[in-house]
Amino acid sequence: MGSHGGQCITEVAAVVHREGRDVQRAARVARDGSLGGNLAAFRCAGTRRATVSGMSFRPAIVDIMMARPGVMQSAAPGPVAQYIQRIAAQPDFPSAVRVIHTAAATLTSSQNALCVLFAGGLAAAAPDGGPSRRLDAEVRSLVERVATTGKRIGLGRIAVEPVGAAPARCVLIVHRPPTGAAYSMAELATLSAFAAQLHGILPQLLRS
């Protein structure tokens, strides 16, 4: 195993904060640079390799500040707010999920993204109008931990972000190939800002 692989496993142990099976699963996922047998689910999500073309990118902190009273607001919404508007305007839930996938991937420069619903201890890929996608045991374990704790898990080239406080009804997963760079703090902050604003419209989406 190269030095990069060893660094990934060290990062996993620091993030998961727990010895035993969870760390072993997370380390295996990080070492492989993928989500194991669930790669097909990512390919079916229909997201293209992320770019920021067509949008004026700015740090997520701008979008956060725009929501605070007493702070001068910019005339144009940032990319996070633009995507939230697009998602809210979709005619049905699968259409909204497709935009969620595109938004999460694009905002974090990810290869793919996946929205996972969590309820009653069960995790299921959100329907996007395509073939149904099965989540393997490793992915379900990571989703359950994030949803029940309300805390992100970062595995270098994979990030699992809760949508809302614990117990979260929805989790976002973004992913890069083994040759990709680990997510930066700025990218993770943008993903967190997107998840926070998505949480505000999630009840509306689930009713559609």
Image: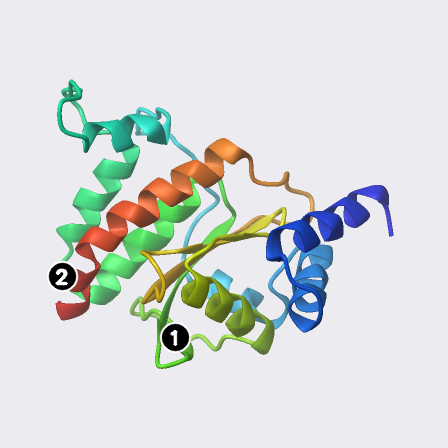
Asked which secondary structure carries label 1, the reply is: loop
Residue at the spot x=58%, y=48% of the render?
Answer: 176
The image quarter containing residue 107 is top left
Q: Position of residue 35 (x, y in %)?
A: 60, 63
Q: Position of residue 83 (x, y in %)?
A: 25, 42
Asked which secondary structure carries label 2, the reply is: helix
Q: Position of residue 121 (x, y in %)?
A: 41, 80
- Whole-number angstrom distance, CA of label 2 to CA of label 1: 24 Å
Q: Amino acid at mark 1?
A: Pro
For residue 208, side relative to residue 168 (left or right): left
Contact (Cβ within 8 Å) of mark 2 with mark 1: no
Residue at the spot x=41%, y=80% of the render?
Answer: 122
Q: Please say if 169 is above or below 192.
A: below
Q: Which residue is mark 1?
A: 131
For residue 94, side relative to residue 59 (left or right): left
Q: Which residue is mark 2?
A: 204
Q: Residue furthest right?
A: 1
For residue 148, side relative to residue 84 (left or right): right
Q: Quadrant of the C terminus?
A: bottom left
Q: Position of residue 191 (x, y in %)?
A: 40, 43
